[in-house]
Image: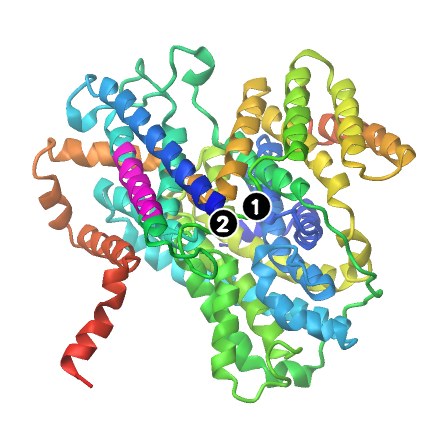
Amino acid sequence: MKNIKNNDTIASLVVFLIGIYILIESIKLMDVGEYYDSPGLLPAIISVVIILSSSILIWNAIRRELEGSTVRGKSNHFDIKKESLLNSRIIMIIIIITLYVVFLDYTNFLISSISFLFILMCYLKSTNLLKITIISVVVPVLIQYVFKNIFNQIIP
Amino acid sequence: MIEALSQVLVMKIIFIVAAGVLGGIVVGSIPGLTVTMAAALLISFTYGWPIVEALALILGVYAGGFYGGSQSAILINIPGAPSAIATGIDGYPLALKGEAGEAIGLATVESFFGGLIGIGILAFVAPPISKFALDFRSHEYFLLGIFGLTMISKLASKSLLKGIIGACFGIFVSLIGLDVVYGAVGRFTYGKTLLMGGIHFVPALIGLFAISEVLTQLEKTQSFSAIPKTIGRLPKLSVLKRYFYITIRSSLIGTFIGALPGVGGTISALVAYDDVQRYVKKPSRPFGTGAYEGVIAPESANNATIGGALIPALTLGIPGDAVTALIIGAFFLHGLRPGPLLMVRSPEIFWVIVFIGIISNIFLLILGILYSRISVYVITVKSTILMPIIVLICAIGSYVFESNMFHVQAMLVLGIIGWIMRKFDFSIGAMVLGIILGPIIDDNLRRALLLSHGSNLLISFLSRPISAVIIVLILGLILSEIQWVKNLPRKIKSLVMPK
């Protein structure tokens, strides 16, 4: 349970740091024009809101930890799902999708999409190899046909 | 109105609406596929279409998707769409009792009535609101944007603070790119040409809604127990008559809640379910064990939400829920600006939406019953097959509208960010609304400040009655989340009436 709290505290801390970063960048933009029509005005306002909100979240997390209250059954900011944030399965899925997006830039849509579907479905053990092969080929061909001929769109 | 009717009553448009409704029902019924995801994808595909055709497809999917979730909620107790969560409470026990056909039939007819009532109210209420909103200026638009974001932050997230942070992130994303006032100044672009054009909201929405959902779905494994074949049966007229008052009452609740900026069908269905539980003293069966009232109330409410959600979207340009946020996006893509001026400049578009809404509901009634014959096969498709295909469609959807690979990359990055945000309960809905409303808020804040030359800003806001009312509403929303304020009535009561 402690991990859950820590995860949330860390997330709030990351948000806090993002807020600080936006504030610094916004201040640089405040030099342009008067303060009231400066491009940095709204970013500065939202950064302050982010910093304040995340500070309260961090403060609440620390207070609860000090009070030693249990998270279970309470409606508060700490309802983080109990599974760990990253597991090897989801990391692998993200890597495969990222590689697909990268390859899409360099190769033809059909080749990259067929490979992507085949690899991802094999990794996920979606169904048997024959069905995976059929789906991997049929779906991209069908999508290419629909987009090119029915929607008249240019595809990657 | 006649012009709008002539634009809608064309075979092509009617066919597109029917296809949209069917597509929406299928998408809505498959757990993991959401109507928001479908609408986000459709906006990019229909970018080059005429506005009436694009609206016909998107609104058809919207109506079908809200209803479709009920089929899986009833048959497998997994709501295909969040708006069907309440339907499963009594719908699934009905299916277990061998009354799945009756439950689906009832859900279909009630969705039809709810949808029609919602659209009817939209037709009557939107024109006067638009007239009233013609007096709005930058101050009011800025505050309305903030009000919408506060509302969605409060309702779409477990914590108001996390909702607000999500909304701020959304505004931040929308501000990336060249500044509209000082054209040569790039905000958060770091000199990169690709970022100068900003992050377009279409890939951002596809990433946040669809890719984050794909990652969430693929994290878990799902299995379905054997489901009997089901055929939806239309309820008897006597049954409809008996529950007519509940239909009207729940539809009004759905429309009203839908009209609140940032609140969607899920909340309205849950509120209607809660209301019917309090209101009906002697249900057909105890609630939670297969009461007809427990299916009627949420189903009529969630489809009535559509009409309600379109009211602030069309009259003020403030989305009622995530899908209407996307519809606003579609308007912008087609060179139209939703808001009070829409009624003045393009009134036929408003009536086109009303007529498409009516036709959608008619198709929903027909196709909903027909679809129930095959829904069992569709809703049990494995997510490990479906989700990789969705990634493919998302990639194409992000690419096609500007033929730019940068949008696909932006979609992926925002998808991963959205998935992390979901993990920590930061609101995706608030972020999306932030992306849509960000430019409106930025533009109107700077205009309002320019008008007051940067001084007496607070006075200039408070001296305008509508602005003052909106400020009070925003403060009320924020204060109502503070524990000390929540306890205040009890403290006052104990002081006034000591034990």
Q: Is residue A90 above or below residue B217?
A: above
- Can the viewer see residue B56 in this picture? yes
Residue B364 is covered by the magenta coloring: no
Q: Nearer the viewer, residue A125 or A34?
A: A125
Quadrant for the C terminus of chain B, please.
bottom left
- Picture disc at residue B36: 1
In the picture, measured across the screen, residue B304 lies left or right of residue B141, that is right
> Mark 1 or 2, which is nearer the eye?
2
The residue depicted at 28 percent of the width and 55 percent of the height is B132
Residue marked by disc 2 = A1
- Identity of the residue drawn at 44% across and 43% down: B426
Separation of marks 1 and 2 at Cα, in angstroms? 34 Å
Q: Secondary structure at mark 1?
A: helix
Give amino acid for label 1. Answer: Thr
Dot 1 alpha-carbon crowd within 10 angstroms: few under 14, some 14 to 19, many 20 or more: many
Helix, strand or loop under label 2: loop
The magenta segment is: A47-62
The 10 Å Cα crowd at callout 2, few under 14, some 14 to 19, many 20 or more, is: few
In the image, is residue B9 above or below residue B250? above
Task: Give the amino acid at mark 2.
Answer: Met
> Closest to the observer: B177 or A135?
A135
Q: Position of residue A113 (x, y in %)?
A: 75, 24
In this view of the protein, which residue sits in the foreground, B128 or B471?
B471
**How far across and how far down the image is residue B112, in percent?**
62, 66
Q: Is residue A56 magenta?
A: yes
Q: Quadrant of residue A32?
A: top left
Marked residue chain, label 1 = B
Residue B489, by quadrant, is bottom left
Magenta span: predominant SS is helix
Image coordinates of residue B48 in percent, x first then y, are 59, 30
